[in-house]
Amino acid sequence: MRPRYSTALLAVLLAAVAFTSTPMTSAADAATGDQCRINNPSSEFVDDVAQDASSAQVWRLYQSIYLRQPRQSGFNYWVALRQSGVPLTTIARSFMDNSDEFANRYGDVSDRQFVRLVFNNVLCREPVDAGLDYWSSQLRSGSTRSDVLLNFTELHEYMRVTSTCFSASGVSQSDLDHCDPDYEDRLFEQQVIDLTNQVRQNAGCDPLISNPLLHNAALAHSVDMATNGYLDHLGLDGSNPGDRISRTGYDFRGWAENIALGYRSAAAVMDGWMTSEGHRSNILNCGLQEIGIGHHNRYWTQKFGIPR
């Protein structure tokens, strides 16, 4: 069987009001001035962020925007709002739009400079051109700066490096699953497999068997795309999907691959794939026999194989 893969599929983000601020410093300084100042919660906040998702989210906003620990009164105020149901994106927007501290630190930065400072503040690195271009284009298309920021502060990578994702004695696991760096990813992956087999059954195809080698190949590609800020079937090392499957030791007669970026749930990414002809044809190819899913930081890879 001739290998086949479909074109990449991007998620559509919601449009909202764009960010503005009062110029107080140079744009160049704003984009490059405070790199690699990632901290962990201080003793005043360590217990709160370990046991409460709202506290952890608010603490990460202080760290990612202001590069400092919160003041207790301000922290308590924003956590209470978050716990009352105020969306995190609304709080993030207030941190930027209504803050003299933000204006004094960053000034009136362009969209590309804003993306750079988010990469610097949150991931402690400069973005590659593909990642810089992608997130800048999202801002031009109507996404708010708070939307973009939260795509980074809620990454499992950022949760790990700031130690805002860890267990605490006396807290049930169900209350901590939101902070397990692998729990949500593995849950999403199984949901995609279940949904894939459901639509295949409706179409008269046999269900796909989950294969750990295909899973490893899929996850490795999602991690690579997320780490390097690109979306493509061709890896940065020049590998195609078949090459990456072969590296795991999976011996195949045929393969297919779907990828996507930005979808927040298994149902959403499946809807996106099923409304795209190329992706749908892979999912409903009755000749394919096995499947592996890799989800990492909203990058999705769906691998299909026919074992030899």
Image (spheres, helix red, strand yellow):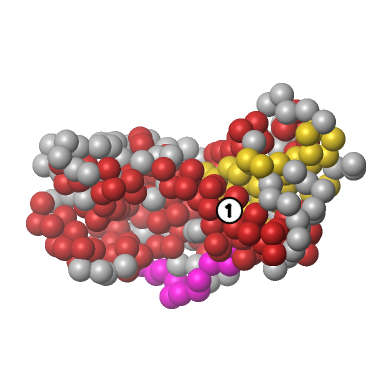
Q: Residues within 10 Å of mark 1 (few under 14, many from 20)?
A: some
User: Which percent across, then down, holds residue 178?
Assistant: 34, 49
User: Which percent across, then down, holds residue 210?
Assistant: 63, 40
Above or below residue 85? Residue 35 is above
Is 148 positioned to the left or the right of 56 in the image? right
Q: Nearer the viewer, residue 145 or 180?
A: 180
Res. 104 in view? no
Find out whether residue 19 is within the magenta segment: yes
Residue at 29% across, 65% down: 91
Find out whether residue 27 is within the magenta segment: no
Q: Nearer the viewer, residue 55 or 40?
A: 55
Q: Secondary structure at mark 1?
A: helix
Which image quarter is the C terminus in? Answer: top right
How many numbered markers are drawn? 1
Residue at 50% across, 58% down: 265
Amino acid tagged 1: Asp
Q: Nearer the viewer, residue 137 or 280?
A: 280
Q: Quadrant of residue 145?
A: bottom left
Is 137 positioned to the left or the right of 15 in the image? right
Residue span colored magenta: 10-23
Above or below residue 242? Residue 263 is below
Q: Quadrant of residue 269?
A: bottom right
User: Which percent across, then down, holds residue 172?
Assistant: 22, 44
Which image quarter is the N terminus in? Answer: top right
Residue at 15% across, 40% down: 170
User: Which percent across, then down, holds residue 47?
Assistant: 15, 41
Res. 290 in view? yes
Q: Nearer the viewer, residue 36 or 190?
A: 190
Check disc 1 and report the residue beneath it.
Answer: 194
Dominant SS type (magenta): loop
Residue at 9% across, 57% down: 73
Residue located farthest toward the right when viewing the structure as drawn: 2
